[in-house]
Image (tube, rainbow, N blue to C red):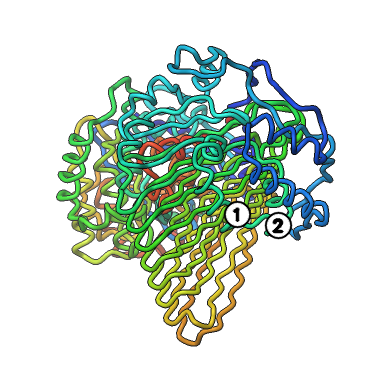
Amino acid sequence: MLVIKDLKVSIEGGEILKGVSLEVNAGEVHAIMGPNGSGKSTLAAVLAGRDLYEVDSGTISYMGEDLLEKSPEERAKEGLFLGFQYPIEIPGVSMVNFMKTAINEMRKHRGEEPLSASEFLKKMRQKKELVEIDSSLTNRSVNEGFSGGEKKKNEIFQMAMLEPKLAVLDETDSGLDIDALKVVARGVNNLRSSENAIIVITHYQRLLDYIVPDYVHVLYKGRIVRSGGKELALLLEEKGYEWIRQEELNL
Amino acid sequence: MQKEQDQILNEVTTGEYKYGFYTDIEHDSIGKGLNEDVIRLISEKKNEPEFMLQFRLKAYRHWLTMKMPGWAHLDIPPIDYQELVYYSAPKQKARLSSLDEVDPELLETFNKLGIPLEEQKHLAGVAVDAVMDSVSVKTTFKETLAELGIIFCSFSEAVREYPDLVRQYMGSVVPYTDNYYAALNSAVFSDGSFCYIPKGVRCPMELSTYFRINAANTGQFERTLIVAEDNSYVSYLEGCTAPMRDENQLHAAIVEIVAMEGAEVKYATVQNWYPGNKEGKGGIYNFVTKRGICKGDNSKISWTQVETGSAITWKYPSCILKGDNTTGEFYSVALTNNRQQADTGTKMIHIGKNSKSIIVSKGISSGVSNNSYRGLVKVLRGAENARNFSQCDSLLLGDKCGAHTFPYIESNNQSAIIEHEATTSRIGEDQIFYCNQRGIATEDAISLIVNGYAKEVLNKLPMEFAVEAQKLLQISLEGSVG
Ligand SMILES: Nc1ncnc2c1ncn2[C@@H]1O[C@H](COP(=O)(O)OP(=O)(O)O)[C@@H](O)[C@H]1O
Ligand SMILES: [Mg+2]
């Protein structure tokens, strides 16, 4: 589904990703871990098409096509979803209107009719229950005045509404209490199927108690320095990132 | 990054005016220039009674003593008033009984504007009095209204048919001495609408008027008068778009509203006169005096405006809250793009006890435009427990435009409570990217954000107008994205 080859990315002249390769197939859940500043959000943003970042070399293919050729909205309409580490507030635009516009843009892209008001509201209701999002949140403006936890849950709610093929969740677990963490996990596990793939970016291993990944990668200073199964996350938890740092120094 | 963002916004926001076309209809005009003979000729062509001619002449003589005002935040090129044409009427048969008799070119123009009269005629609950240039072309729904005793006709017709009413109220809210453009309008006004709601009558439909400017170099001077008797109610809509012209056109209208005891008048405007091209060439100068008086106790006047057009807009729909327990409201969205300049706001004059006013102003600036809110809240000594709440927000697209807020407060009563809130925000690249990531293209994202921002005001418009206004905001910001 997603093949990243030797990706090098810089911003304002500074190289952040220094040759990242990663292959994600349908049905898989990958976890990307790493200390702050290692380039996790950069990778997510480049996948979503943020033009702030300069792709210096390397390729990304998504469902057999060149992802880097496509605009951010095309990527979204072709099923790529980014759960933002810091979700953005849009005053005055109601969640209902925002979601309806988004869903209907995607349906238009697939050559489908817009959802009727009742179909849409039904879907909203179902997905709201799934993520246990407070009913009033969807009546408010997009993320406006939401608490940190509410914003994160709202990302999961949007993911559930949009039913993406590939979801990239950037530290959706950060700053959440255990209950909210379980909500996030449930949202992800619900999406999980043989058709979809999910990349979970996380700083901590505790989320991985609830979302069991097929693969774990450690991103360190712009490079994937370790890849393995879910036991790698436990090893990291036990030894800390300091361990990676030492290992890298020894090389 | 900031540069790139501005470039995107520039591309999105430097759209050309979508309603630029000109209808080729024969005009019956008086030559250029202004003097007493021209005024006599206008009055004569309109078959006006003597009192009307005298009113015009007094106003003209007063205007001669006045100077064109200057404003801090508007850059107005000098206007040669002798170069303007002060009367122009589309030539057509004397009386029309059905739409079939209306000039097909004219109907075509309305069709391009998306306001086909044919359909409007059937549109439930909307009576349309279409004004093109200076003479009323067609009035519909008149009979239904007449049964309720409601008068809704062109101003010229009112002058002939209801001279006593016109005489009693014309100039009672906006005297010809009020300002330079009010004096000019009073001297040369062409036509407009007159509306009279008798005691205790609720007007069952929205009254709407479409104004058009369509003759080269024609100063357009409408005049509207609405009188709502005790415990009556009326909702009035005014909307306009103008065709593409190269020469600047002057538009100086007067709207007067009188609300008697317990009466309520809602006045909504969608203003989309030609704003000029990207470089600021052409475009309408829109200098309007709109004022209402809540004369009787418990009366209410509400102004709602969506201003997207004109090269220069200068307009302050105001309320004189004379009666006790009266309410004045002002809801405004003013959008400026390219080189447009707008200086708009309101005046709320509290005279009566327990008088209340609400001001919600939403400015949107893009391109290299300038957008100012200027508002006065004045509480007179006798206005016990007067209350005002003002909310003035500015939204900026790009970094070459300007937004300014000038709230003036004069309170002469200790018991008055006046609150003012103001915010300025910018559409950020991260907001647009967030929308993009959810499948929404940049142009639609901007439109979504702008409409969300203006929602509080758009919600005050009647349903069909709100949809039109939303489209207008979108069209006004539209351009060529990538
Ligand atoms: N907009 C930016 N401008 C300059 N440097 C940036 C910007 N965004 C990220 N960086 C730098 O890139 C590096 C990687 O950041 P990021 O991808 O956010 O890491 P992570 O998500 O792993 O914490 C950091 O050193 C950070 O300071
Ligand atoms: Mg990050």
Q: Nearer the viewer, residue B33 or A2?
A: B33
Residue at the location (19% across, 39% down)? A123
Please state if A125 lies on the left or on the right of B397 as rendered. Answer: left
Mark 1 crowd level (few <14, some 14–19, many ≥20, 10 Å Cα): some
2 and 1 marks in contact (CB < 8 Å)? no
Mark 2 secondary-structure assignment = loop
- Please give the label number shown on residue B400: none
User: Quick check: do tags 2 and 1 share a chain?
Assistant: yes
Q: Which residue is mark 2?
A: B179
Please state if A108 lies on the left or on the right of B195 as rendered. Answer: left
Residue B71 can be seen, yes or no: yes
The image quadrant of residue B11 is top right
Q: Amino acid at mark 2?
A: Asn
Q: Residue furthest bottom?
A: B414
The image quadrant of residue B251 is top right
Report how far apart the C-alphas of labels 2 and 1 lie in the structure.
12 Å
Please state the quadrant of the image where ligand 2 appears.
Answer: bottom left
Residue at the location (25% across, 60% down)? A206
Please state if B259 lies on the left or on the right of B286 as rendered. Answer: left
Q: Nearer the viewer, residue B341 or A89?
A: B341
Q: Amino acid at mark 1?
A: Gly
Pointer 1 chain: B
Please state if A208 lies on the left or on the right of B255 as rendered. Answer: left
In which quadrant of the rendered image does the C terminus of chain B lie? top right
- Please give the label number shown on residue B171: 1
Q: Position of residue A74 (x, y in %)?
A: 44, 30
Mark 2 crowd level (few <14, some 14–19, many ≥20, 10 Å Cα): some
Residue B279 can be seen, yes or no: no
